[in-house]
Image (cartoon, grey):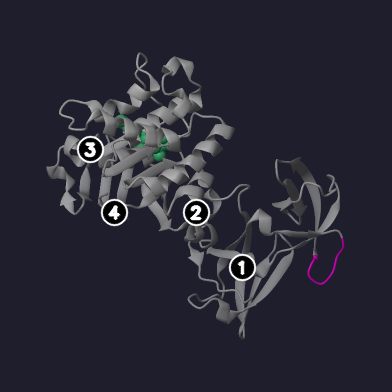
Amino acid sequence: MASIELKNIVKDFGDVKALENLNLSIDEGEFIVILGPSGAGKTTTLKLIAGIEELTSGQLLIDGCDAASMKPADRDITMVFETYALYPHMTVWENMATPLRGRGSQMDPAAIDARVQKIARILRMEEYMTRLPSQLSGGQKQRVAMGRAMVREPKIFLLDEPLNHVDAKIREELRKELHLLRHTIKSTVVYVTHDYIEALSLGQRIAIINKGRIEQIGTPWDVYFRPANLFVASHIGQPEVNRFVGRSRLDGSSVHIDFPDLGHEIVLPSGQFPNDNMDGQKIVAGLRPQHVRLSETQDERYQLPAEIVIRENLRTELDLVLRTGKVKLTALESPEKDLPEGQQMFLHLPEKHLMFFSKNTESRIDYQPGN
Ligand code: ATP
């Protein structure tokens, strides 16, 4: 295990700024996920840690020592890329054992076998140990590639979208196995993905990266329920968070937020916004689709009329797109509900689930709803 500290890291490739002043501290033994869209700088971050690329400026510390003074080979780091490269003429067992059998290895054959079998058990590959890579499915090959990286227990383990090229079912299975590994291997793990479900499921903390900068670092709970800004709020969650643009005004001890496109105003106690002056602010409100409440009848709470325009039956939920005023929003319902396209509904937007952002800075406004 080793701690990793990235301080004010800049990485340019000619005119391309891949990383711009990136700061990230990773604790010894932590499993951290770096999440971000394509081109955000995720792989570049891993390559800098591994020593495959050099920093343009900034400082990288591994266990408190400046990595500039360490050769890549001395960093005790293993990196698994999204595409697996196995030795085609070696069996699964031999592929997995190679890192332990290299030149200068002091390990005796029984210890090597025990270590390979232990990892194979976690990855559920025991019955395939004598097969060649050509006799394996894509998901099994990726398991072997991960297994080969894990047998050695490096100080730092870097995983670059290891589940990218496997189909959805195997992806889910491997994700569960990665959970088991989290508890088994002692390495510090930096796991890169663009899949927010993988990030929420695996990361002790998640660093969200965009255009070479970290947007937020936090626990899965933090980034989902208290996103630092609109980018994080929309990047995490599917379907994407609903957004409504409004303007706030203060009236005594109440904040009125008017959403003209929605034809709706909400009134909240000003004390629920302890750190912001809410008078005359342009606001974006966010509400996750699973928090939109629907009713077929109008009452005090269910006031906003809306029409179902798209109904999509997904695996475990019914994904509905509704139009209300000039706004389209998404809601999730239980799939057994009989809610056809064209049906009129009434919406309730629960205050306790609303998130507010400044329209100008896109940063989250501290909002502390009552119960
Ligand atoms: P993806 O999810 O698509 O793999 P990523 O977040 O891993 O993306 P990086 O591969 O780190 O992104 O790339 C960050 C930026 O740096 C991109 O704009 C990319 O085009 C650029 N880049 C990366 N490597 C090089 C290189 N060797 N030469 C020039 N530009 C590069």
Specify the segment rendered in magenta: 297-303
Q: Give the amino acid at mark 3.
A: Gly
Q: Measuring 46% from the left and 23% from the top, which residue is drawn there?
A: 128
Q: Measuring 63% from the left and 69% from the top, which residue is drawn there?
A: 352
Asked if the residue at label 2 sits under 8 Å from ligand 1, the reply is no
Which quarter of the image is occupied by the C terminus? bottom right
Viewer-nearest of labels 2 and 1? 2
Pick whichever of labels 2 and 1 is earlier in the sequence: 2
Pick whichever of labels 3 and 4 is earlier in the sequence: 4
Residue receiving disc 2: 232
Q: Give the alpha-carbon distance from disc 3 to disc 2, as whole Å.
A: 29 Å
Vertical placement of residue 284 versus 48, above or below: below
Pick whichever of labels 4 and 1 is earlier in the sequence: 4
Q: Are marks 1 and 3 in contact (CB under 8 Å)?
A: no
Image quadrant where residue 297 sits:
bottom right
Q: Where residue 28 is drawn, which disc sits there?
A: 4
Residue 215 or 218: which is nearer the viewer? 218
Residue 195 or 329: which is nearer the viewer? 195
Q: In x, y percent, where is residue 160?
A: 39, 36
Q: Is residue 231 magenta?
A: no
* Label 3: how many Cα within 10 Å (few below 14, some 14–19, many 20+): many
Q: In x, y percent, where is residue 104?
A: 15, 28
Image quadrant where residue 242 sits:
bottom right
Q: Is residue 52 left or right of residue 336?
A: left
Q: Give the alpha-carbon distance from disc 2 to disc 4, as whole Å.
A: 26 Å
Q: Give the alpha-carbon distance from disc 1 to disc 3, as whole Å.
A: 49 Å
* Label 1: how many Cα within 10 Å (few below 14, some 14–19, many 20+): many
Question: Does residue 39 show up?
Answer: no
Q: Give the alpha-carbon distance from disc 3 to disc 4, as whole Å.
A: 19 Å
Quarter of the render that holds ligand 1: top left
Q: Give the amino acid at mark 2.
A: Val
Q: Give the amino acid at mark 4.
A: Glu
